[in-house]
Structure formats: C-alpha cells, structure tokens
Image: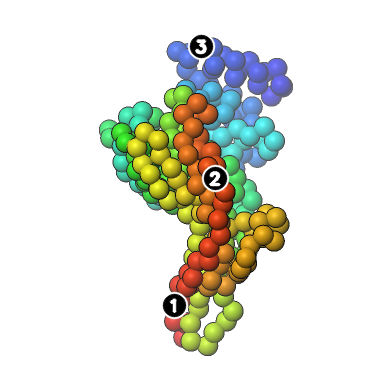
C-alpha cells in the first residue's frame, strides 16, 4: 500500500469514528510479513481503542481469536494475539477499569517482543490498551494503592539477556483518557550464580517501586540498579553487582499534578540489598 493510501486509512479512522474500520486495509498498510496473523484466523472487523488513534493501536477480530495491532514509527507493525493465559491483576484503576491483562506473543524472540497491557471493565468491556514496546519476553502485573480514590497498575517487564532476565517496573495512571506510565524503575537482573554441586541459585532483581506516602500528594521510592550509569556506579560507597548482595539506588519521587507524572524529589541514596538469591536443589 502506498503512503498516500495508508494516510487515507488513518485519516478516515481518525476523523470519522462512527464509520467502521477496514481490517484488511489496516493489515495491508503494515506490509508483508506480519507475524502471528494466522493465530486469529480470517479477519472479521477492527475496532478503535478508547481515545487512542488507529495509527497507534487497534483491536483486530478474527474468526479464531482477537489481537492488538501495534504500530511503531521505526519498526512498523506488530500483532499481539489474545491467546493463552495472560498476566492478570484486579482493582479500581479508574476510567471504569477493574481488570488489567498483560499480553506477549508466546513465540516472541529477545528484542522483538511486542507487549500490551489492556484494561477492562467488570463486565469485560475494553477501556484501554497500551503498548510497552518490544523488550518484554515475559510480563507480570500487580496493583499499588498510590492515590486516595483508585488503584494503580504495576507492570513488571522481563527482558532477556541470555540466561539472565532483567526487570523493568512501570506504574500506570489514567492521564487525559489514556493509561500512561507515570513512573518507572529498572529493578535489576536476575543473575544466575556460579554452579554449585548441591543447588542452583539465581538473584532476584532487588529494585522496585514502593509507596512512601499515598493520597492526593503521593510520594514514591524508586529503587533501581544503575547498571548503565557510570557516574552513579563510581559514586557508590560500596558497589556490589551480580551476586546475592547488590547495590541499589533509592530515589524519592513526588506527584506533579501539572506534568501528570512523578518527578525526582531530593538526592538519591545508596543501599545494599542482601541475600537476594533464591536457590533450588540441583536436578538429579
């Protein structure tokens, strides 16, 4: 499909929301080689998602299943079929959202794994769906009570680095009709420990997002591991990495109601997370 034709597909979907989207035209605009399309079967219809433009994400319905089609400016289109067992968390997330699901394709490869967090009402109506990019090979979900009148979705995105899984945490908040990441922290890497005759041990990423103060003016503690920040590593009084004791950075962050996100408040501090490994007996 030409760029002009693609522009017409997007413009039509954006300006005439009452008109049905053409699923075949949307898929054709992505070009050849859209992975996982066979998983949903013959295309039946396409629906916009909340207030998001179809140029960003749409919901496709096929004869066998449905899927989320994500558009990226740099790498084109990716499809996330709604099949298998997703990650789930429940709460009062705002905008009518009561249940959140985390989805990644079952056959994704490291570095090219489109991930979607979808939010639905108690009666299974889709409220919103947001892409977490292409780095999560696995996803899990929790909820945090950060504000006084609703819960927040906490997504744990696991990225692959060979045998060692890294984890990045994202906190979602409804902003202008869309669920949006408003705070994040790189929790670290689950390093496999040196072989032992009796047990197999792996470090649990020690970072996290903690709630210091909840309510109208919440404060978070963003606990992260600055593997790629040479300045913070050099400044650490006791830098430990890779083993069962690891250095972490604590950064307080306050809610900025105008910017609709959490912003750093004060200087960061260092600590060492001890005994973070979990071990299992060696298989016989």
Instruction: Answer with mark 1 or mark 3, whichever residue precedes in sequence.
Output: 3
Quarter containing the N terminus: top right
Residue 227's spot in the image, x, y percent?
Answer: 64, 58
Counting from the top left corner in percent of width and height, residue 31 is at 67, 32
Q: Of tags 1 and 3, which is closer to the observer?
A: 1
Residue toward you, 99 or 93: 93
In terms of secondary structure, where does tag 1 sit?
Answer: strand
- Nearest to the observer: residue 111 or residue 148: 148
**Above or below for 6 versus 171:** above
Q: Is residue 89 above or below residue 181?
A: below
Q: Would you identify the image quadrant in which residue 126 lies? A: top left
By what rule are the colours in the image chosen?
A: rainbow
Find numbered disc 3 in the image and state the secondary structure of the residue it sits on: loop
The answer to whether one can see residue 56 in this image is: yes
Earlier-in-chain disc, 1 versus 2: 2
Q: Residues within 10 Å of mark 1 (few under 14, many from 20)?
A: few
The structure residue drawn at horizontal position 64% and vertical position 31%, both measured from the top left corner, is 30
Q: Which residue is mark 2?
A: 266
Between marks 2 and 3 in the image, the one whose residue lies nearer the viewer: 2
| Residue in the image at 70% along x and 17% along y | 4
192 to the left or right of 198:
right
What is the spatial separation of the Cα atoms under label 2 and label 3, in whole angstroms? Answer: 47 Å
* Residue 25, picture quadrant: top right
Residue bearing the label numbered 1? 280
Q: Which residue is mark 3?
A: 16
């Amino acid at each position: 499909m030409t760029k002009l034709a693609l522009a017409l597909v997007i413009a039509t979907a954006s300006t005439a929301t009452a008109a049905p989207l053409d699923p075949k035209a949307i898929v054709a605009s992505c070009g050849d080689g859209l992975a996982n399309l066979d998983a949903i079967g013959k295309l039946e219809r396409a629906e916009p998602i909340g207030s998001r433009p179809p140029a960003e994400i749409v919901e496709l319905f096929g004869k066998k299943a449905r899927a989320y089609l994500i558009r990226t400016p740099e790498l084109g289109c990716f499809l996330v079929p709604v099949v298998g067992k997703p990650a789930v968390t429940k709460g009062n997330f705002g905008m009518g959202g009561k249940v959140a699901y985390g989805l990644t394709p079952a056959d994704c490869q490291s570095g090219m794994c489109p991930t979607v967090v979808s939010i639905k009402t108690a009666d299974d109506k889709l409220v919103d769906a947001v892409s977490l990019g292409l780095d999560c090979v696995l996803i899990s979900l929790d909820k945090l009570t950060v504000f006084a009148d609703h819960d927040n979705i906490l997504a744990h995105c696991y990225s692959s680095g060979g045998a060692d899984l890294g984890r990045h945490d994202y906190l979602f908040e409804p902003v202008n009709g869309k669920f949006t990441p408003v705070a994040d922290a790189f929790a670290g890497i689950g390093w496999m420990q040196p072989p032992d005759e009796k047990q197999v041990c792996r470090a649990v990423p020690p970072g996290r997002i903690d709630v210091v103060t909840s309510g109208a003016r919440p404060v978070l503690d963003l606990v992260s591991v600055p593997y790629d920040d040479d300045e913070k590593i050099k400044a650490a009084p006791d830098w430990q990495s890779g083993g069962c004791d690891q250095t972490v950075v604590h950064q307080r962050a306050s809610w900025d109601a105008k910017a609709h996100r959490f912003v750093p408040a004060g200087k960061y501090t260092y600590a060492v997370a001890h005994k973070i490994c979990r071990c299992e007996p060696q298989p016989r």
